[in-house]
Amino acid sequence: MSESGSDGGKWLDAHYDPVASLYTFSSCVDLADLSGDGESRLVVGDLGSGSSGMKLKVFRGTALMSESTLLDLPAGLVAFFMDLHEPRIPAVAVASGPCIYVYKNLRPYFKFTLPSLEVNTLEQDVWQQVREGQIDPPTLKEMLESIRMKADVPLSVRSLRFLSLDTSDMGEYVQLHKQQPIRRQTVITCIGTLKKSTADEDGVSCLVIGTECSDVYILDPEAFIVLYKMSLPAAPTLMDVTGQYDVEFRITVACRNGNIYILRRESDKPKYCIELASHPVGLVRVGKIVVVGCADESLQGFTQKGKKLWRIVLPAPIITMAAMDLPTRGFQAVLVGLANCEVQLYREKNLLSTIKTPDVVTSICFGRYGREDGTLIMTTKGGGLMVKILKRTAVFDDRDSSAGPPLAQSVRLNVPKKTKLYVDQTLRERENGLAMHRAFQMDLSRLRLAAAKAYVKALESSLTPMSSSLTEPLKMNAVVQGLGPSFKLTLNVQNTAACRPVMNLAVSFLYDENLYRMRNPYMRIPLLVPGLIYPIETFVECTSDRGISDIIKVFILTKGRSSPLLTAHINMPVSEGLTLN
Amino acid sequence: MGLFDKLAGWLGLKKEVNVLCLGLDNSGKTTIINQLKPTNAQAQDIVPTIGFSIEKFKTSSLSFTVFDMSGQGRYRNLWEHYYKEGQAIIFVIDSADKLRMVVAKEELDTLLNHPDIKHRRIPILFFANKMDVRDALSSVKVSQLLCLENIKDKPWHICATNALKGEGLQEGVDWLQDQIKTMRT
């Protein structure tokens, strides 16, 4: 268990497999109790290499439990309850291409294909003529291109494919396909679930699908018929559904034109529209707030009616987003996977914690996995699978990171009442303001002059224990040890220059010869290496028995200068030795 | 063992010991306690424990009172209220649940660092349960994952068990009984 500092040790690292070869996005990951034993499994629609190896994988704990091959790239995956049978085992719906594959007990159960679209009649006529051999491929190409330019109904995939071919391949392509009738089909771009009539956790859900031709369908879970169809101005890419089909529902759709539309029951056109400055890359609903991640590295919050609440700037582009909902603790937040290998957790606009990941996270799923409610499952760009469990004791403190007036500003100060004295003083100050200011300025100037004079005097007589000379920067302090009559005097001399040694120094003492006797009142100081402290010791004997003390002056002298470099005054202690005798 | 204890033993009076049975949900605590009870008192169906339940059973020389605590996340904060009373701890681990081994370790660390436990030399018996499950971890692996070798100031012992059949339980209980006896004398 490693605890990274930034997430404050809130997550336990339950599992990390960097080579799980799981390549997927948040829309293709879901958690569901697929065997009805109270242990949730992880269901993943694996995109494989993008052209092959698409699989539906199911994980239990740390191990892969089952995998089955998918025919096409999955666009979305949801687990949902399609009936009321006991035991309550959810089905898995995988959207790929124009179809939804429904799995029950991890076995293929049903395939739903979107209703085919109206085919351009002109296009149909042209292909009819091809079948009868009336026109050759180059003419066909010409005619199809002219239809494409002006027709209201777009061409079918077959015609579009034909137009993109080289002239040499056209004949073969026409031979291969001309006998089949033309069909125009759309593909599914996103999928979600909508509870049918109850808000229960295990209530029957309808599938909600968004298609490339800008429609949103709601499907009946048992009969798989289209219950409701709504149209959007652009192709949907991300979808969030809330509510119940029979009561009231709200579908929030992010579209490819950079807008977000909000659809509601009893209206087949969008009710509200949010126009974004940048394209949406993530859409999550937290309670009543729609959180949108945009391509301009920002996270924005909107009300359900499309009113903008806040916007924050993120440190890196958003890769994926997911909701973190922990109903047992009443905690809701948004997880944002960023391109700088971080997953950040936001409650509204406040950053709660950051998880550092070894690789860029491409899909995030939070929920109950196994028997643990607060499990965070992430897959990485390199195909890794990471499982983290929220600690039971973890607490996210909601510190408001936004800049604004500090809390103390709104606290009222306890201002005392104005007294008579206060009012009089204020009046006096108001009347004599100029004179008071002048008097203050004069005193201040005098004080500065006095201080400067004292400083100059000290410098001139070298009274300071710090040498001001640039050539011999010295520092000294003195220590007196002993009770008397004999004292030990230690001078600690230090050369504070950066690299230059100091030579030819001497120490001399000035003292009252009636009181003290010194063994050697003049000493030479050796060469001082910069930085080191040199202790210079001497002994002082107090000759008086009257219990008085005096000052001993210490001078540091240099050769060829009459004034000392440093002066120190040592207050000698009273000799206790003699009085004891 | 003192003379009085011997006397009490002859008279059939057994010393009472309070034991806490802890572990994550679905690790098999209640099943283990159920196996240790006399055959006629055993329950047929084991259901998830809510809060806690008190069970009693006897061994050759001791009378155990077991606080069978619920392991569910929302009840785990109840554990610490019983630490003071406990004279020994049985910690049950689901050896087949590799994913939640970190959660078990986290709960064990919290337990060992609790002020009511930290400075007491109370014996801890680990049951690495569910050995019958196909890819269950061995007891050595479990003790590695839980870093049991770091417990230096308390006697501990780990047993591989299968609570459904009762395999391995007696060995653990015998160890616990010995430890409690040596603690008393």
Image (cartoon, coloured by chain):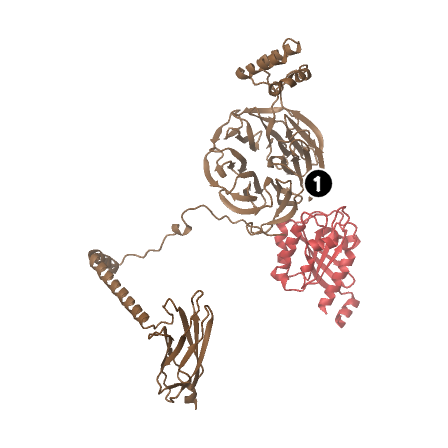
Chain colours: A brown, B red
Asked which quadrant contains residue A202, the reply is top right
Report x, y in % for residue A248.
54, 30
Q: Residue furthest front?
A: A560
Residue hosting label 1:
A64
B154 or B150: which is nearer to us? B150
Helix, strand or loop at label 1? It is strand
Q: Note whether residue A484 is visible.
A: no
Judge whether A471 appears above or below B159 on screen. below
Asked which quadrant contains residue B143, the reply is bottom right
In the rendered structure, the answer to whether residue A19 lies left or right of residue A428 reads right
Q: Residue furthest bottom?
A: A581
Report x, y in % for residue B69.
67, 53
Q: Note whether residue A173 is visible.
A: yes
Report x, y in % for residue A346.
52, 43
| Total numbered labels placed on residues in the image | 1
Chain ID for label 1?
A
Report x, y in % for residue A43.
66, 37
Judge whether A295 appears above or below A146 on screen. below
Judge whether A384 appears above or below A50 on screen. below
**Label 1: few (<14), some or many (≥20) within 10 Å?**
few
Query: Residue at image x 28%, y 57%?
Result: A418
Query: Residue at image x 42%, y 78%?
Result: A524
Amino acid at pointer 1: Leu
B103 or B69: which is nearer to us? B103
Image quarter hosting the C terminus of chain A: bottom left
